[in-house]
Amino acid sequence: MAGRRLRVLGIDPGLTRCGVGVVDVAPDRSARLVHVSVIRSAVDARIEQRLAVIAAGIRLVLAEHHPDVLAVERVFAQNNRATVMGTAQASGIALLLAAEHGIPAATHTPSEVKAAITGYGNADKRQVQTMVARVLKLDELPKPADAADALALALCHAWRGGGPQVPALNGPLTPAQRAWADAERLTRR
């Protein structure tokens, strides 16, 4: 992987709106937008139909962009059980498709992603959108928030080193990456 870009597919799972973003990240940690979209399913459709729509959308992105790795938001506890279930189901579809395509996959919590992108694990949606736009040199903020979150997941994964199956990118850390690395070291103590 040394000297070549890492292509990461980030997925912000959801039944109604599933954010999908593909970025290329160079060894110096600079990044370029490849693709961003939101897969939408009808709220009144049956669950199996909604999941099929999400799967079809992710399959198209996998076929068109050939990512090296897939990063998906890790499901976390919420008071809204229906939201958690939908997120978990969409996440499962993404992870299954990664396995079917022989692509390594990883999960990241929302606070890990926020810390990696903004340097602050409790950043709001606007802060994440702003930093994603800045990193990717976009003229506008990525919208809706699901699209920005998918791109943030992809960037987080590449900057974190990509996990055990994907070699880390080399190069100096940005201030946000340093803050994230420091915060992660503290949680391991």
Image (cartoon, helix red, strand yellow):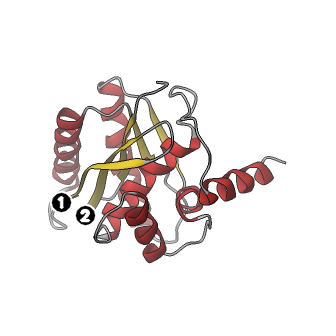
Q: Residue at x 41, y 62 (%)?
A: 132
Query: Which residue is more in the foreground, 176 or 124?
Result: 176
Q: Amino acid at mark 1?
A: Ser
Q: Position of residue 151 (x, y in %)?
A: 37, 55
Quickly name the residue at label 1.
41
- Which numbered dot is residue 14? none
Neighbourhood count class around disc 2 (C-alpha, 10 Å): few under 14, some 14–19, many 20 upward: many
Q: Position of residue 58 (x, y in %)?
A: 23, 43
Can residue 107 be spotted in the picture? no
Query: Which residue is more in the foreground, 126 or 2?
Result: 2
Query: Which residue is more in the foreground, 66 or 11?
Result: 66
Tell me if label 2 and label 1 are in contact, CB under 8 Å: yes
In the figure, is residue 107 to the left or right of 11?
right
Query: Which residue is more in the foreground, 180 or 189?
Result: 180
Quadrant of the rendered structure where residue 168 is? top right
In the figure, is residue 63 to the left or right of 83?
left
- Above or below, 62 against 47 in this view is above
- Above or below, 6 against 116 in this view is above
Q: Position of residue 8 (x, y in %)?
A: 38, 40
For the image, the number of numbered tags is 2
Neighbourhood count class around disc 1 (C-alpha, 10 Å): few under 14, some 14–19, many 20 upward: many
Q: Residue at x 49, y 42 (%)?
A: 158
**Considering the numbered disc 2 on the image, is that residue within a helix, a strand or a loop?**
loop
Can residue 119 be spotted in the picture? yes
**Considering the numbered disc 1 on the image, is that residue within a helix, a strand or a loop?**
loop
Q: Residue at x 46, y 24 (%)?
A: 1
Q: Amino acid at mark 2?
A: Thr
Quickly name the residue at label 2.
16
Alpha-carbon distance for marks 2 and 1? Answer: 5 Å
Q: Residue at x 60, y 71 (%)?
A: 122
Q: Position of residue 63 (x, y in %)?
A: 18, 33
Pointer 2 or 1: first along the chain: 2
